[in-house]
Image (spheres, helix red, strand yellow):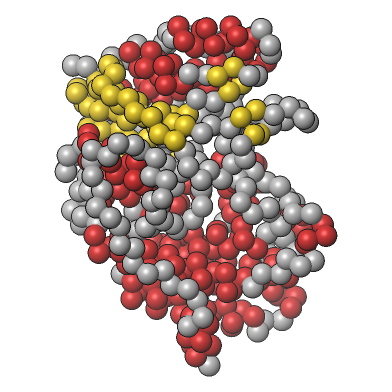
Amino acid sequence: MHEQRLREQMSLLYLPEAVQEEPESIVEQDWDYATANTKTYTHGFHAYPAMMIPQVARRLIRLYARPHETLLDPFCGSGTSLVEARLAGLNACGIDLNPLAVLLARVKTTPLPVDHLQATLAQIYERYWQLQSLPEEEQIHRIPRFFNIDYWFAPAMQRELALLRDAVLEIPHQPTREFFLVAFSHTVRECSYTRKGEFKLYRIPSEQQHNHQPDVLAVFLAKAEANIAGMMRFASEVKPATWVQVFQADSRQRQPIPDGSVDVVVTSPPYGDSHTTVAYGQFSRLSLQWLGLSDEEAKSIDTRALGGRDTSGSKRIYQSRSLEDTLSQITARDKRRAKQVLAFYDDFALCLEEITRVCRPRARACFVVGNRTVRGVKIPTDAILVEMAQCFGWRLRDTFERRIPNKRMPLQNSPSNVPGEKGETMTREHIIVLEKEV
């Protein structure tokens, strides 16, 4: 009976058709990709803040990498560059502090048979309805207790999400279980009271909450089916001899990657500390709490990210005239903010030191960076990066600039969190390509 109901529900779901992309010329005049489909293959599995679009990663790999080389993304986020590496015949290593990012990157780069995924989805559906038949007290007992769950989820959503999560967690095969946990994470966000289209945690107004009654199972089924369609294309085109390793780790620290083993770096590092730029931890918190991470761990991601600690007593391992000039201007307006900016670049220098260790001579490193504004002062991260990298034995090879189209950010924000104080968000990115000297 439930299998028949599943088939009926599936017939109502939208399954994306295979995308026919126009051939991409490597000598295109711009890097904007304003009209490009950024959700092909597994790239559309799950939203994530400030994602590098696949077209940029793909083009950098075509320009600066060769098949069978090893790519590193030390700030891999949800794994865009890692997916493109496998499709291009490269091996890849990714590093990220955020457990949700690591889960997404691992799932998006792991090919799985589509028939197996479809069969497992039917099992999840059947098990969900079995759990629905349990006594109400037992269903309620399955709801996790974490900080502010009642603030973000209606009671009915809590019960249905708990049953769905338990049905997914019963899957014995880890890669398959993680595949469906990604769809579950998406469902958590869609069924919460969070404002849609934003990455920071803001709750919809109370007057809208009564009408917010999504069908948990339908949301999950739609996302799972869409992801299966994306996996079908990825699994058919991925180069089977390649491998990907994703580490939940801190790129400021030494990683289990041998000296001189990386040929190319393709990455989009954070633009600044998470408290005043992109709040990766806030975006991930509800999903991670539903996936079993402790409140303390889920809430500490932004604090543990680059620039989240005071580095005033640390020894400088780099020099940058551009950074010194910028800090002088910010200090004149706000000493505390200047210290936060310095802390970010101090931490970034530690990452550059580790990147240098694992890269071989003549390795290429491609950084997609944005120049943020603090207290009305534009920070030239592109120039600062080049000057810092020279201290570690890198030279500038190429630079490109791209407009950021269709940003999911307002034209203005409040980086200082002071009511009424606004600043422009970034509309352009710089692509800095470095080469490691011998």
Q: Closer to the camera, 69 or 373?
A: 373
Q: Quadrant of the C terminus?
A: top left
Considering only vertical position in the picture, is 320 above or below 385?
above
Q: Is residue 183 left or right of residue 212?
A: left
Camera sees residue 70: no
**Residue 393 placement, left or right of 377:** left
Identity of the residue drawn at 42% across and 8% down: 319
The residue located at (64%, 9%) in the rendering is 331
- Residue sitting at x 39%, y 40%: 32
* Picture layout, residue 26 above or below residue 435: below
> Residue 21's x, y, as percent?
30, 57
Answer left or right for 305 relative to 152. Answer: left
Picture quadrant of residue 232? bottom left
Position in image of residue 87 (x %, y %)? 25, 52
Quadrant in which residue 337 is drawn = top right
Instruction: Report the side of 145 relative to 75 (left or right).
Output: right
Query: Looking at the image, can residue 288 be seen?
Result: yes
Residue occupying the point 37% across, 69% down: 17
Position of residue 335 measured from the top left corner of the image (x, y, whole percent) = 67, 11
Displayed quadrant of residue 373: top right
